[in-house]
Amino acid sequence: MQKFINAPDTAVPEYLAGLAAAHPDVVRFQPDDRIVTRAAPAGRGKVGLISGGGSGCEPLHAGYVGRGMLDAACPGEIFTSPVPAQVMAAAAAADHGSGVLFVIKNFGGEVMNFGLAAEILTRRGMRIEKVLVDDDASFPPGLESRRRGLGATVLVEKIAGAAAERGQPLDQVAAVARRVVARSRTFGVALSSCTPPRLGRPTFELPGGSYEIGVGLGGDRGQDRGELPPAAAVADVLLDRLVGELQVTEGTRVITMLSGLGSTPQLELFGLYGLVDERLRARGALVERSLVGNFLTSLDSLGALLTIAVVDDELLDLWDDPVHTASLRWGA
Amino acid sequence: MQKFINAPDTAVPEYLAGLAAAHPDVVRFQPDDRIVTRAAPAGRGKVGLISGGGSGCEPLHAGYVGRGMLDAACPGEIFTSPVPAQVMAAAAAADHGSGVLFVIKNFGGEVMNFGLAAEILTRRGMRIEKVLVDDDASFPPGLESRRRGLGATVLVEKIAGAAAERGQPLDQVAAVARRVVARSRTFGVALSSCTPPRLGRPTFELPGGSYEIGVGLGGDRGQDRGELPPAAAVADVLLDRLVGELQVTEGTRVITMLSGLGSTPQLELFGLYGLVDERLRARGALVERSLVGNFLTSLDSLGALLTIAVVDDELLDLWDDPVHTASLRWGA
């Protein structure tokens, strides 16, 4: 197995220790609770934000802890939800007296464990709001409940994080987070599966010259498989689904994010983005901001997730607020 | 071939167009000259900085064009030096009346073509200084001339870029660039080769369970090959070479950069960095700043390059100056 690890069992804590070592001014790793917190916790009164999920999807979520985004993150084992105790530890670290927003991706284990933690903490008197991220456009209308939380997670954490940093109260922070979810969709493709360290082999085999359409995170197969076309046709596949769902037309203002799945070269990712961007503009959309890079991944999977969020002045303004995390940083 | 491209021949210009589309506030792609320039050129009087080299090493160099780093970049074909006409076009775009610094990596074609361009432009009256980056620690003392330009390139572009932004004259900007080169070394390992689009197959075969030691960019084999050990031993291999060459001892202040080679998952890269960082601190080194991510790559190669630069107050201060490029951004 061609991996830079000591052993499958230590890969996650060693990643977290390395993240904290590389960014000591931004995050701390608390190994006993298996959570990541801000190096400089926010002051009293700020609404807290937490998120978490299966490891292997880096920089989700620890890479987004810091000023302007999350207060704490609870990473599970690889492709496995964090346990409720981790969620509760993260919430405790994030609570500055004004309540905590749980950003939960729509995966069974996460919904259950964040839900359990919220129930217990609410009984103990903590104010909690939950936002469920289910931006996955792989499942058609009618199957909304199966839509996974994908790229919108990053956008929600950035925009709601900015609202919290501005001192907005919990209900407003939760409302803006839900607004981002409602206006965002993600659609992804993969040209390879990935190799989880404990499994030691690819999660599935993909014949050369073919690709998976409608993938999420975690090395699962997509909803469909096809013959891999030139990048321009891949751009069409990604875009058509999102543009339809979000009703992007002349003058629609959007933020775009194209994330590699872990092993996608920048040469290809930016090349693909250029084709997406060109097509969006041809439809008259106004691309206000864009991110291209590894923003949520699936270990060493070769693939790309395209996220589009329809924005207005308020969302864009929150987007532009300063942020200082390991993986997203500007104005600070 | 599992790639997001339209055709091998269009991959580079489509990457550059995509980079400009994703960062319209930072860079422009000028397809006729095949160069990338700042979206907002610097004002009169600032010393210009340019660099360039074979494509496939993204974000080198176009990802480092922007305020605080390069004024222009000239990307060649994949793993092929830019031609002199490109270098001259980049220099012309970067010249604001106070001369231009050429940041040249020690690869035969680059040295020759940047040298030719410098000769012609100097004859035409442009003031030019050249800095040769040869931080590769793969070749032992005595074979210095074979040392390739690797991670120090990013550090030189950042630090000399800041000096230029402060209004320092050409000789001072060149002097600080040379100081960074002299105090930096890079050593790298790879767990796979890469697949250039035109070649359509890996540049070499690496048996599972083994790794290349002392690699550069471009998919060449390393200076040595060994059985892949646990990450802790890889950290030792990387570090021992650099610490010896740079004489890192108790109290030595350093900037570290660990760059993935293109397909290295963040989980592994940060995990490896944590082991490196721990060892550096155990030797008493003061790790002042660190970067972990894809800062110079080799298409889809799985591997890591560790760069260490010994710094002082002046270099650290220049490092911390604001920068706004596609791939490095802070304070702006």
Image (cartoon, coloured by chain):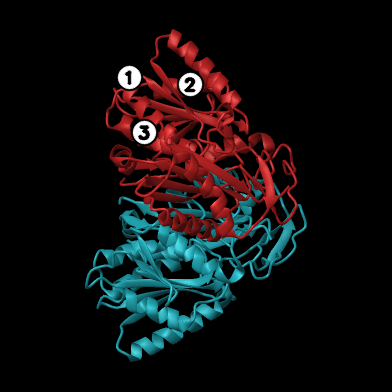
Chain colours: A red, B cyan
Please say whether residue A74 is visible from this viewpoint.
Answer: no
| Callout 2 crowding tier (Cα within 10 Å): few <14, some 14–19, many ≥20 | many
Q: Looking at the image, is A65 positioned above or below residue A264? A: above
C-alpha separation, residue under disc 3 versus residue under disc 1:
14 Å
Query: Residue A96, position in %: x, y?
Result: 34, 21
The earlier-in-sequence mark between 2 and 1 is: 2
Q: Which residue is drawn at 60% across and 36% down?
A: A12
For the N terminus of chain B, the image quarter is bottom right
Chain of the residue on which disc 3 is drawn: A
User: In the rendered image, which quarter is residue A278 located in?
Assistant: bottom left
Secondary structure beneath dot 2 equals helix
* B180 sits to left or right of A136: left
- The image quadrant that residue A5 belongs to is top right
Q: Which mark is residue A292?
A: none
Q: What residue is shown with label 1?
A: A98
> Closer to the camera: disc 2 or disc 1?
1
* Amino acid type for the residue under numbered disc 3: Gly
Q: Mark 1 lies on which chain?
A: A
Q: Which residue lies furthest to the bottom in this view?
A: B123
- Residue matched to label 3: A161
Q: Which mark is residue A89?
A: 2
Which residue is found at the position 58% from the left and 47% from the top?
A261
